[in-house]
Structures are given as structure tokens and as C-alpha cells.
Image: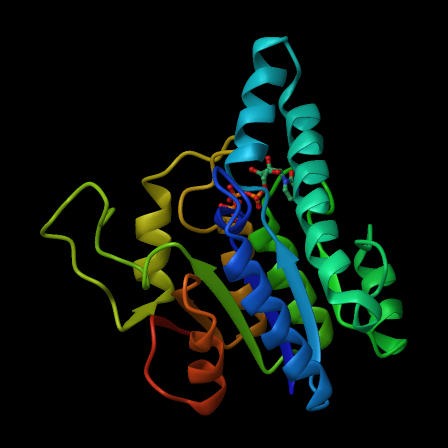
Amino acid sequence: LKLVIKLGGFLFSPKPRINLIRSYVSKLKGLYEEGHNVVVIVGGGKQARDYIKMARTLGADEASCDQIGINVSRLNAMLLTAHLGLAAYPTPPKSVEEALRALRLGKIVVMGGLTPGHSTDAVAALMAEMLNADVLIRTLDVDGIYTCDPKRRADSKRYEKITLNELYKLLMEGKFWAGTYPLFDLVALKIIERSRIRTYFVDGRDPSNVDKVLKGLPVGTRLVV
Ligand code: UTP
């Protein structure tokens, strides 16, 4: 299979979840050894937001703030690459072309952001599109997409499946500045829509959810495309 997995930046900051990172590395190696093509996109997390906040305070424009976020997500990607060893392409690719070349070398590709104006979700969607991926898995620090923020509202309910229109509506309520992509990026959703990419939102705190998606078991929230 051709898999694209976006790992949320919550793995790395505010508190590095070392055991969880190790579990993902074993899982990714396992998938690679089974012969799957694996692309992993890593988010910048709180560290990216903190750096962006500092840059903005110092007067940086939004695109430069984005560039800072991209660099933080690449640093996180390098942490994962370091632990993956020879199974992974040694540096985070800086373009989709480089990522595709890295895949042809038969390596796991671990990357962060690419260009300003969107988040790493859009990078994951682009990679899934170019690879004609069988599935795109977006990990979250909750167990799926909810009707409203489950950390703020006790009456919020998880969607087992969500339509593109329902997700657009949820996302339109948010703000899209550097460092503040709420839940998911609209650019990513547009790419998923135009190429009908099979997409799941799952709880990233449990790496076995990746297996559940691959086995077709119900998990998290499935996007109806
Ligand atoms: P993230 O993708 O990490 O943002 O990129 P996020 O939505 O907060 O994701 P998680 O929660 O960490 O998984 C951090 C910032 O880097 C810039 C954006 O400003 C984004 O908010 N960025 C990232 C880009 O401009 N382009 C990219 O390709 C990636």
C-alpha cells in the first residue's frame, strides 16, 4: 500500500512524548519491512506556535512566520528520521519532487512543511495526491473530529464519518493565520476533495489506530469523499 501519515506536532511539544515517538518508529519500520510505501509528515506543534509568536512580536510578516513554522516542523521530522536510521531518507525533503525521488530510493520519507501559506496538513494532502496514496491518516490529540471542541464543551459529539461539506462548515468558523490552523487546513481539504483521497482522522496517542485504518476497522472519523 501507499500510505501518507500526518503526525501531529503534539508528539514533540509542549512535552516530548518519547515513548510514543518510539512506538511510531517501530510501527513505521514494520510497515516499511512489509513492503508498504510510507510518507510521514510531521507537524510543528506548540514549539512552532511559540516561535511564530516571538517572530510576530518582533514585527515579522506572516510569510516569514510561516517559514519559521516550516523550519520547526522540519526539526521535528529530523528527530523522527534520526530514530528511524537507515530505513529513512536522511533529510526532510524540501519539495514534493525531492520527496518522490526519495521514495524511489525505497526509503521511508519523513518531512515537515514546504512553502508558506498553509500547514503541514496541506503537505500531507499534496503528497497523498502525487503518490496516488491508498489512504491518508491524520493523527490528532483527540479520538476524531467532534461537533465542537471536545476540550471546551462537554456536550460535543464525535463524528464516526463526516462529509466534506460538514468539515468545510466546521473549518470556516476558524482562523487561518501562521501557527493557528484549527483542526485541519482548508487547503488540504480542497486537495482531498479534488482527488477524492481516502482520509481518516484518528487518535494519535495510540499508534495501533494506524493498523485499524489499514484493516478497515471502524476508528476515529472517516471523511466521506
Ligand atoms: P503545522 O502544520 O505544524 O501547523 O505547521 P499545525 O496546524 O499547528 O499542526 P500541528 O498541530 O503541529 O500538527 C506550523 C506552522 O508552520 C507554517 C504555518 O504557519 C503553520 O501554522 N507552515 C507549515 C507553512 O507555512 N507551510 C507548510 O508547508 C507547513
Q: Is residue 111 left or right of residue 210?
A: right
* Quadrant position of the C terminus in the picture: bottom left
Front residue of 13 and 203: 13
Quadrant containing ligand 1? top right
Q: Residue at 68% of width from left, 77% of height from top?
A: 29
> Is any part of residue 178 visible from this angle?
no
Front residue of 146 and 79: 79
Q: How many marks?
A: 0
Q: Quadrant of residue 131?
A: bottom right
Q: Position of residue 143 (x, y in %)?
A: 32, 63
* Quadrant position of the N terminus in the picture: bottom right
Q: Position of residue 173 (x, y in %)?
A: 32, 40
Q: Is residue 149 left or right of residue 178?
A: left
Q: Residue at 55% of width from left, 68% of height from top?
A: 23
Q: Position of residue 117 (x, y in %)?
A: 63, 38
Front residue of 59 and 213: 213
